Amino acid sequence: METDAQRIRELADGLASGLAGATDDEVAAALAESVTSLRRLADVVERRSDALAATGRLAPVEVVVPVLGVDGCSAGWVGALLEPGAPRPRIVVAPTIADLVAMVRESTGIRVVAIDIPIGLPDNTIRQADVLARQALPGKASSIFSTLTRSAYAAATRLEADSVNRGLVGQGVGAQAFALRDKIVEVDAWLRTRPTVTVLEVHPEVSFAAMTGAPMTASKKTDEGRDQRLAALAAAGIPRPSVLQGQGYAVDDVLDACAVAWSAARHASGLARPLPDPPEVFSDGIPAAIWA
């Protein structure tokens, strides 16, 4: 069976064959740069596959472009910025998702923003992203909240949302799920401004499970859970951030943001996979999938 690395190399070879016929120097230079980048990507993919086959763990991620992983926190949003050549993630905090991304873009050209929040809201069905994420986390499925319907998020109160959601999909609305409403609506509104950056949904527990080959066993709120996640991140190529907590954000918020950034870096390298594949698309037109 042809591997991903082989397919990428074939694409590079196809572009390389076009170099001989390129009469424009600028076109030839662009083709040559693309060929080099594709061959480098093929090498990365091959190393990842070899590491996974040998150990059951993915090889450490290579940060090829700046990416931002984001998690919600009491201060608003906390981000872990990964940049090529940087020794460790840079932690940034802002009250809104728009402010956070704008602040980071003032100093670096981020290519991917990954967020631990549902993106792509269903109309009258259960999202497959949530179903498949639970299946990927045996013993930890409760960490995945069901995304409500778009109409339920438009409700002013949990009781109203509960009634709307039950009528559409037969599921009620718990307090914890409804507590995410404001942040979900905020990100949804921001996406409708068409930010000029790739935006993904990532769930940190799914990312940690992908890193290590199994779900994290200890709660992220405990010392053991913190140490497990720091070790998983280090093995996955994400060094310990210089800051782990601050005003309005806790250790678990930062570690979740780092895990989300790991998936963003994998997406930038063409290695991340969506749940489901391909993503669902509802009436909002926004692809709905959890990436890892």
Image (cartoon, rainbow, N blue to C red):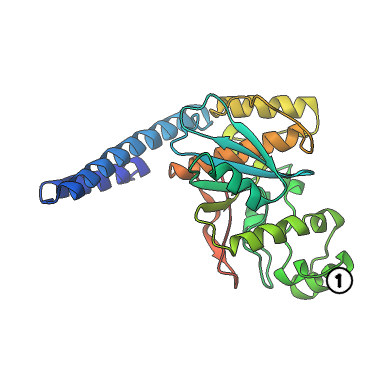
The residue to which callout 1 is attached is: 160
Q: Classify 22 as above or below 62.
A: below
Q: Classify 275 as above or below 12.
A: below
Residue 158 point in image, percent of width and height = 86, 64
Picture residue at 85% right of the left edge, 72% below the top: 163
Residue type pointed to by label 1: Glu
Front-lying residue, 4 or 150:
150
Q: Please indicate whether residue 61 sits to the left or right of residue 104 in the image.
A: left
Q: Classify 150 as above or below 74.
A: below
Q: Is residue 215 visible?
A: no
User: Which residue ends up furthest to the front in the rendered image?
Assistant: 106
Q: Is residue 243 visible?
A: yes
The C terminus lies in quadrant:
top right
Quadrant of the rendered image containing residue 42: top left
Front-lying residue, 94 or 1:
94
Residue 110 point in image, percent of width and height = 50, 44
Picture residue at 51% right of the left edge, 27% below the top: 86
User: Which residue ends up furthest to the bottom in the rendered image?
Assistant: 167
The N terminus lies in quadrant:
top left
Q: Please indicate whether residue 237 sits to the left or right of residue 190 in the image.
A: left
Tell me how many marks there are: 1
Residue 205 point in image, percent of width and height = 67, 41
Q: Please indicate whether residue 83 sits to the left or right of residue 177 in the image.
A: left
Question: Badge 1: how crowded within 10 Å, few (<14), some, or many (20+)?
Answer: some
Front-lying residue, 267 or 96:
96
Q: Element at badge 1? A: helix
